[in-house]
Image (cartoon, helix red, strand yellow):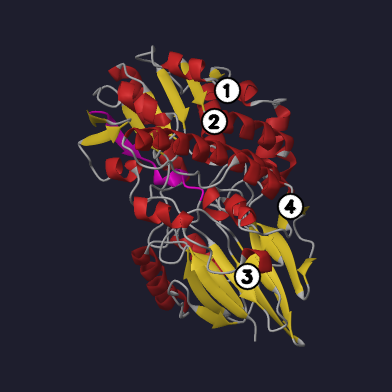
Amino acid sequence: MALLSFLGAIRQVTGSCYLIESRDGVRVLLECGMHQGRRQEEDSNRAPFPFEPAGLDAVIISHAHLDHSGLLPRLVAAGYRGPIFATQPCCELMELMLLDSAHIQEKDAEWESTWRMRQGKPPVKPLYTTKDTEKALALRHPLPYGKPHEVAKGVRVTYHDAGHILGSAIVELEVQDQQLTRRLVFSGDLGNSCSPLMCDPATLDRADLVLLESTYGDRDHRNNGETLDELAAILQQAHQDGGNVLIPSFAVGRTQDLLYYLGRFYQEGRLPQQVVFLDSPMAIRANAIYARYHAQFDRAHQAEIEARHVRRAEDWLPILRCTPTPDESMAINRIKSGAIIIAGSGMCNGGRIVHHFKHNFWRSDCHLVFPGFQARGTLGRAIVDGATTAKVLHQRIAVKAQVHTLGGFSAHAGQSQLLDWISHFSQRPELYLVHGELEKMQALQQALHERLQWAAHIPEPGQQVAL
């Protein structure tokens, strides 16, 4: 029978990667994600692939976040020349994110090489280059939602809306293996049904094997209305305290949600700040892509946006100021109060947010708002866990800012939503939990057993199972 190998995002959140091999010799890679978080996890991005890239027939990507697509340029540099399938919006967002990632890889390698050469050590090479990325992007093949497509001999894929970010997909794979057809469903990252703009995740009812994400397998998110009230209260308190509000945010997905909510606050007279800075070139470009695909928003928000004749984020939130250039970004730090600063990266392990930390983070009137999950090993996780100092741009700085975590803004489904999604499968397929820290997986495994009387497996890294 066909084999499924668990190669990434196994007992951890990032690095999504699964290999499907048929007895007819067809090999399809599902996801090619980057490991993010601890240094040793990120170092694994340089390890040899546990398969021969040139021997793959196709690559299937669920959505554009780097933990699902971030190693595609390296895969191509290692010899892959076949098609890369994704939805049309995902293809556009991948171009944005992968080119940005390549630029970071090149700059980081250049900086580290300078220091190493001063110590008499050899220079380092970037994980991949812009040229590698351009070659990978040339292999993209966009597919629509809901229409089966043969991606390799005997393998058909159908994408269904996952409701996570624009273009995100649940992946349904039909694998024909010597007259036997088996159906594998990968949830991808399932969206939070309370998220603005995105549709609720599609439900499926047939599969032989399901891979289910478990990022928030241990808990439900806070009620959306309560979360918005909490954010409004934080903004009001920051206004009274006289400091700035820093929001580390993922450029694709989370930022667009935040801008939607801040725009609504502005229109309701609940936004006391004088200006909102979007200090992320990638997020600014992502806004334009979201605007082009507004027809894929859920109907209620689509109607609201169209009724107000919104064409740009600035139309929805008039006090928004986008700062694409480094000079514009640095100028923000002359403002000591009354500003909301949204900047990347989402887990604070780089990007412009760390520069704003340097100028604000030691001030007790500053409010630092985390609107989503912080992976282990990241600066964001250390701060959420109560660090009193943090190393920022090679300086040890006191964390005096007031820290807030708003789990209700997560773009991932919570435990009850995961249970509801899986309950739609009628024949109880074999179930494997992926994309989660081990304790989150174990909590979801127990909930599946207690509430649905459903056994779920937690695979080992490198484990193979028959389809």
In this orientation, does residue 252 appear? Answer: no
**Amino acid under label 2?**
Leu
What residue is disc 4 on?
A: 139
**Sequence order check, earlier mark of 4 and 1:** 4
Residue 331 falls inside the magenta stretch = no
Task: Name the front one of labels 3 and 1.
Answer: 3
| Quadrant in the picture for residue 394 | top left
Per the rendering, the mark at residue 259 is 2
Task: Name the front one of labels 4 and 2.
Answer: 4
Q: Nearer the viewer, residue 47 or 332?
A: 47
Q: Are marks 4 and 2 in contact (CB under 8 Å)?
A: no
What residue is disc 1 on?
A: 317
**What segment is highlighted magenta in the picture?**
400-411
**Amino acid under label 3?**
Val
Task: Name the front one of labels 3 and 2.
Answer: 3
What residue is disc 3 on?
A: 185
Real-space Cα separation, disc 3 to disc 2, in angstroms? 33 Å
Q: Nearer the viewer, residue 60 or 265?
A: 60
Residue 405 falls inside the magenta stretch = yes
As drawn, 342 above or below 123? above
Real-space Cα separation, disc 3 to disc 4, in angstroms? 24 Å
Real-space Cα separation, disc 3 to disc 1, in angstroms? 39 Å
Q: Residue 177: x, y in percent?
A: 72, 83
Per the rendering, the mark at residue 143 is none
Label 3: state its secondary structure: strand
Identity of the residue drawn at 63% across and 64% down:
53
